[in-house]
Amino acid sequence: MSAPTAANSGTPAPTDSPRTALEALRGEIAKAVVGQDPAVTGLVVALLCRGHVLLEGVPGVAKTLLVRALAASLELDTKRVQFTPDLMPSDITGSLVYDARSSEFSFQPGPVFTHLLLADEINRTPPKTQSSLLEAMEERQVTVDGVARPLPDPFLVAATQNPVEYEGTYPLPEAQLDRFLLKLTVPLPSRDDEVSVLTRHAEGFDPRDLQAAGVLPVAGAADLAAARDAVAKTSVSPEIAGYVVDICRATRESPSLSLGVSPRGATALLSTARAWAWLTGRDYVIPDDVKALALPTLRHRVQLRPEAEMEGVTADSVITAILAHVPVPR
């Protein structure tokens, strides 16, 4: 996607189409984040599909800034939770608080009641607290004291984890990993991008003040709702559906994997491919759309055999090999 001209006002400007509005996000986010276009695209795809994202990258590659810039560009609320070993489920979802004046208990919402929740280092908290997000992620609601409380719409969880530090962590179980629509890797920047980052900071850029950096909302809730409706109308041929199924079935037969992609994973791949097709200007899905989203959609839904892992095989390499061998519909 190309980077269109950003809006000049503090409110989203009217656009000819929701696609134009969402394309403008790239230009706004670029004011705060250098590079990382695949991660930006992945977050937009997740919003379109009502999914959640697992961001993996070493500290200092702008994962937090990326989510904050996206929220500012969409005029959405965002909150950040630093996951620690002593974090309790109620610290995420909220709890009942006794009001001495009324002699009653009232519900105090937790940070999950927002549009974009950044769950920082989610693998540093015990499974009990990790699982507190499951209902929120899947059902878009939180149940406390038997009362279901709906979450705002849109609602996206962007969870981060460090790929090089495992001591004192609690790896997410496969069942919870499957709740994330995409797993996006946030790499270290290239030399040119890193020089650009340093230049911006030398010129006074403050990552804590996105408004001063000129990041303005260029799309609103109405644009996002219209975009989701348009994505839902993107056509999928029987051949494309069969292609998605063949890719996912091939993961279940791979000798390098002990766990392949489930039918839910196949549904997720079709959903992300439709969103990408719409973003690129088409109302139908082609095989290249499926290939473009296969890695981020499937890499966290497979499990390597120990012997394959010892030989240096990765989930990405297995999926890439499968994409090269599964016949492409014509």
Image (cartoon, rainbow, N blue to C red):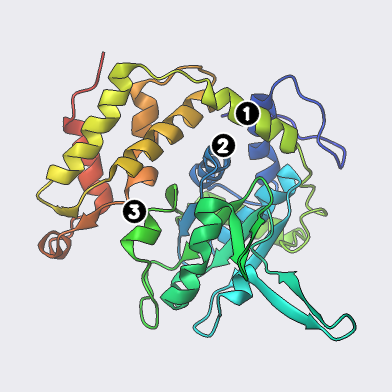
| Rendered position, 97 above or below 71 | below
Residue kind at label 3, given as amino acid type: His
Give the camera-side residue of 49 and 97: 97
The answer to whether residue 270 of the structure is visible from this angle is: yes
Neighbour tally class for label 1: few under 14, some 14-19, many 20 plus, Cα within 10 Å? many
Q: Position of residue 95 (x, y in %)?
A: 67, 75
Q: Position of residue 1 (x, y in %)?
A: 56, 29
Residue at point 44% right, 52% down?
180
> Could you tell me which quadrant the C terminus lies in?
top left
Residue at point 50% right, 43% down?
42
Q: How far apart are labels 1 and 3 at the CA level? A: 27 Å
Q: Position of residue 238 (x, y in %)?
A: 31, 18
Q: Secondary structure at mark 3?
A: loop
| Rendered position, 320 above or below 108 | above
- Provide the residue designation for mark 1: 227
- Residues under numbered marks 1 and 2 in contact, where contact means CB atoms less than 8 Å apart: yes
* Residue 48 disc label: 2
Residue kind at label 2, given as amino acid type: Leu
Give the camera-side residue of 167 and 242: 242
- Provide the residue designation for mark 3: 300
Q: Secondary structure at mark 1?
A: helix
Residue at point 48% right, 61% down?
134
